[in-house]
Amino acid sequence: MPLVSKKCRVTNPEFFGKTLHQTIKEIGHEIVISRLKHSKTEGVFSPTLDTHLLEKDVLMVVGLEEDVNDFINRVGRESSDLIIESASDIQVKNIFVTNPKATHKKLNELDLYNKYELKVTRVFRAGREILARPSLELFYGDKLRIVGTKEAIDEIEKGYRKLRKKTVGTRFSLHLWWFVGRNNTWLHPFFNSFSSCSPQARFCSRAADCCIADQPLWRYWCDSFLY
């Protein structure tokens, strides 16, 4: 079943002052709170499980529709707040798992929030959309939907660009070698071994254990080979 995201206004006094961890555990559904906005403020942030709920907080809830609806009904009511969706200080981006250090690890082992202040809300794998549970094991080619501040995402991209400059000469040689030799029979066995890899093979940033998918397709193969 596809995942949905809905906004929830916290109005049930039973949950005032409780942490997100306590709230989610009490309700018993697997959901992710990707954003939170306190009442009478315009600041939006990606909360931790230790964040305390306050009266009239607005939450962005991600999960299966039935679970999300039940969560909203028990915690409060559906919200029409627009600020939580349009906040410029929170960004959403997709990254791809290609670094061997990240594959076969659980999301909680990567600890992206404490390292980069980034929260994974969804994982896309082989056409399926999976809720980003802390115990979820990652595989090569998984696409992660992340939410975080502009500064946190900029930090990852800065590390990626720095790494890219160090290897630009080697990448140019491989790009030229591929274009010249790709139609020759001597390269076919070697090229075919890589063409069977996931199409999500992307530029890898070791600093972020991920890849930024914003470059032309013809460059993916060489860079996935490099890293």
Image (cartoon, rainbow, N blue to C red):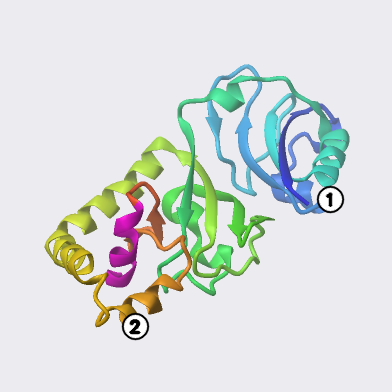
Dot 2 or dot 1: first in sequence order is 1
Chief SS of the magenta region: helix
* Residue under numbered circle 2: 189
The local crowd at label 2, few if under 14, some if 14 to 19, many if 20 or more residues have their Cα within 10 Å, is: few
User: x%, y% of residue 158?
Assistant: 27, 47
Q: Is residue 109 magenta?
A: no
Residue lying furthest left in this view?
169
**Towards the viewer: 69 or 215:** 215
Q: Nearer the viewer, residue 90 or 111?
A: 90
The local secondary structure at tag 2 comes to helix
At horizontal 29% and vertical 64% (from top left) the residue drawn is 223
SS for callout 1: helix
At label 1, the amino acid type is: Glu
**Would you say 214 lies left or right of 107 here?**
left
Residue drawn at (46%, 53%) of the image: 95
The stretch of residues the image draws in magenta is 217-227
Near-viewer residue (18 or 213) = 213
- Residue at the spot x=43%, y=55% of the render? 115
Q: Pinpoint residue 189: horizontal percent, then vertical percent.
A: 34, 83
**Residue 26 image label:** 1
Q: How many numbered discs?
A: 2
**Residue type at the position of mark 2:** Pro
Report the side of 161 relative to 138 (left or right). left
With 93 as the anchor, is 182 left or right in this view? left
Q: Quadrant of residue 36?
A: top right
Query: Please, is residue 134 above or below residue 191 in the view?
Result: above
